[in-house]
Image: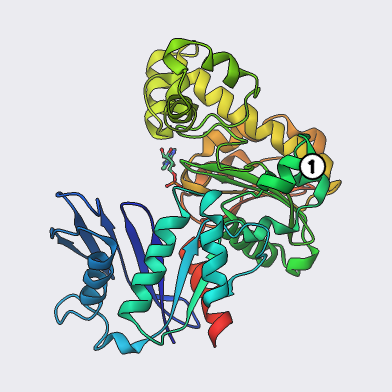
């Protein structure tokens, strides 16, 4: 079966075409700056790359352009769009309703719409992507794979905030957690690497990219996670603050430059994190370079130290939550590619039975590997994430 995976953002559409089962990637690409004059699409087939600079005024045209690339005589991989057997959509928020991927019907569409209030930047473009694909591919089964679903197994004591209970009842304020497709994929791969059934693994999974989150996984299920009601909570991220004292917000709002909700929101989401602390970059590669040049008292070094300290603190917290862990898993752009961040974030954790093999840690990039010392009670695994592949698998499972 041919499965198309669509990840529709407000101004971008990411796609990947798979042959299932087996997850063979036939083609992939990205439409960027949708709605702007400078929009373009990058389409890839094996090692070939095609740049298509065409106006993409809206998502409808974007989806049509993607389908025409997939069936194009010179760069396509299909004779006809009718070969597509199913479409899997990444949907950010499924609220409290969905703990699994769902075949899309009217009921699922209504729920995604209801959750727009909880994810106003993400669910509306996700919905547009679903509608446009349904129009372009009538009758093709579609599946929604939710970022929040994997964390629906959190116990009440972990997902509730100590706010008046009515804020939960009235406004559904609770921890939802995000990056669920990545944490779910890493959990399954880690179980395979450890030679255990998924239901038998306890893990601390660390997704460290531009957005960062961690999860405590007991018996293959998420029991706590660092992101919360929104993806702003938890770890220090590229431009997001992660955890702060909530009283900082009303305090800052009493100052003229932060007196508007939109300003505070922008500050916390776009101007904080590694960028805000360093004043230089949200990109870990640039910061590493800057810290090397400017020394240990630099703000770049401070941002790196805060980043690693927060990861290490949560590892400690989650080890306490789990009691016993089989492995700490690193993924995401930073987790997969940065040996020195992995080292700094796990340094001194021998006390928990976590011992890194420094040579293995430095040995390769972007590959699955066990970087723990032989005999380390808790393994340290590096697992490149594959969110699109996981969406394709979930989609295939739900429609085959
Ligand atoms: P992602 O959002 O998963 O694509 O991850 C983006 C982050 O990964 C950025 O902060 C990049 O600087 C970081 N990253 C990618 N490659 C490396 C590398 N070789 N060393 C350190 N950080 C990296």
Q: Residue at 58% across / 14% down in the picture?
A: 251
Task: Determine whether, in the image, residue 298 is placed left or right of residue 286.
Answer: right
Residue 175, visible in the rendered structure: no
Task: Determine whether, in the image, residue 22 is placed left or right of residue 156.
Answer: left
Q: Residue at 43% across / 56% down in the picture?
A: 124
- Relative vertical location of residue 142 with respect to residue 117 in this rendering, above or below: below
Task: Determine whether, in the image, residue 187 is placed left or right of residue 58.
Answer: right
**Ligand 1: does it lie within 8 Å of the C-beta at label 1?**
no
Residue that badge 1 annotates: 319
Marker count (numbered):
1
Residue 303 location in percent, x, y?
50, 23
Q: Give the quadrant of the C terminus.
A: bottom right
Residue 170 location in percent, x, y?
70, 46
Secondary structure found at label 1: helix
Residue 261 location in percent, x, y?
48, 27
Residue 316, visible in the rendered structure: yes
- Relative vertical location of residue 249 with respect to residue 23 in this rendering, above or below: above
Find residue 130 and report its image quarter.
bottom left
Q: Give the quadrant of the N terminus.
A: bottom left
Task: Determine whether, in the image, residue 229 is placed left or right of residue 22.
Answer: right
- Relative vertical location of residue 362 with respect to residue 289 in this rendering, above or below: below
């Amino acid at each position: 079966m041919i499965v198309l995976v669509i990840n529709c953002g407000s101004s971008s559409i990411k796609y990947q075409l798979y042959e299932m089962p087996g997850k063979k990637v036939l083609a992939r690409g990205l439409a960027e700056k949708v709605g702007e004059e400078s929009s373009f699409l990058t389409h890839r087939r094996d090692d070939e790359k095609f740049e298509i600079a065409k106006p993409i005024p809206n998502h409808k045209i974007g989806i049509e352009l993607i389908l025409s690339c997939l069936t194009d005589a010179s760069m396509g991989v299909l004779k006809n769009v009718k070969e597509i057997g199913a479409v899997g959509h990444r949907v950010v928020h499924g609220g409290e309703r969905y703990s699994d991927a769902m075949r899309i019907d009217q009921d699922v569409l209504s729920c995604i719409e209801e959750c727009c209030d909880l994810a106003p930047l993400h669910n509306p473009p996700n919905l547009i992507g679903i509608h446009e694909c349904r129009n372009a591919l009538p009758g093709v089964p579609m599946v929604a794979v939710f970022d929040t679903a994997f964390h629906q197994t959190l116990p009440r004591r972990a997902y509730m905030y100590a706010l008046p209970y009515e804020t939960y009842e009235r406004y559904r304020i609770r921890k939802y957690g995000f990056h669920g497709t990545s944490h779910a994929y890493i959990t399954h791969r880690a179980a395979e690497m450890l030679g255990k059934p998924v239901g038998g693994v306890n893990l601390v999974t660390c997704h460290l990219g531009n957005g960062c989150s961690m999860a405590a996984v007991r018996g293959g299920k998420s029991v706590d996670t660092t992101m919360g009601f929104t993806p702003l909570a938890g770890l220090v991220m590229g431009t997001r603050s992660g955890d702060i004292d909530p009283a900082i917000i009303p305090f800052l709002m009493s100052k003229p430059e932060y007196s508007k909700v939109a300003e505070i929101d922008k500050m916390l989401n776009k101007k904080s994190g590694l960028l805000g602390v360093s004043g230089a970059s949200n990109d870990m590669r640039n910061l590493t370079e800057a810290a090397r040049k400017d020394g240990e008292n630099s703000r770049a070094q401070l941002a790196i130290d805060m980043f690693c300290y927060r990861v290490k603190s949560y590892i400690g917290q989650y080890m306490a939550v789990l009691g016993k862990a089989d492995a700490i898993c690193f993924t995401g752009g930073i987790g997969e590619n940065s040996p020195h961040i992995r080292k700094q974030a796990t340094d001194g954790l021998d006390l928990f039975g976590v011992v890194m093999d420094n040579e293995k840690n430095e040995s390769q990039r972007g590959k699955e590997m066990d970087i723990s010392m032989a005999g380390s009670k808790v393994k340290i695994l590096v697992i490149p994430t594959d969110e699109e592949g996981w969406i394709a698998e979930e989609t295939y499972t739900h429609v085959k």
